[in-house]
Image (tube, helix red, strand yellow):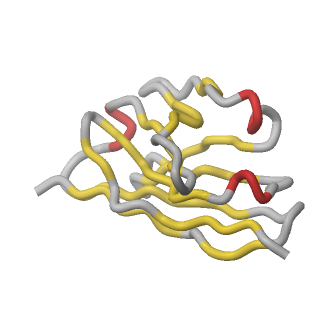
Amino acid sequence: QVQLVESGGGLVQPGGSLTLTCRASDYRLSDYTTNWYRQRLGKSRELVIRMYNKGAVTTYLDSVEGRFFMSRDIAKNEVYLQMTSLEPEDTAVYYCNNDGWWGQGTQVTVSS
């Protein structure tokens, strides 16, 4: 059974950095487009950033442009969301999505 698992969330101070990891079982992430979504409290889930199967990346949220980056390690079958200069407004549950599959989400809290 396909399973996506996110990890790396936590509590970080404003201005800090975190890297989230998305791992998949039973298939190769790099064969498909991978998306990172987030859902802030009381808000709908929003697409943050996308990596296409060939590796190109598109950022969909203006507020994270230049601060959030995606990368991957094909050998490890992992995709990463590198978040820098974090702001309290980035507090959310972050989800990995690939080929219609979703992870369970990982909480990121930005607070002093």
Residue nearest the viewer, comparing 49 with 90: 90
> With 46 as the anchor, is 105 left or right in this view?
left
- Split into 4 quadrants, where in the image is the N terminus? bottom left
- Point out the residue furthest to the left here: 1
Q: Is residue 103 above or below residue 53?
A: below
Residue nearest the viewer, comparing 87 with 35: 87
Q: Is residue 12 above or below residue 72?
A: below
Q: Is residue 28 above or below residue 78?
A: above
Q: Residue at x 25, y 44 (%)?
A: 101
- Coordinates of residue 32 in the picture (x, y in percent): 34, 31
> With 35 as the anchor, is 65 left or right in this view?
right
Residue nearest the viewer, comparing 89 with 28: 89
Q: Residue at x 76, y 35 (%)?
A: 63
- Point out the residue furthest to the front here: 42
Asked which quadrant contains residue 26, the reply is bottom left
> With 26 as the anchor, is 91 left or right in this view?
right
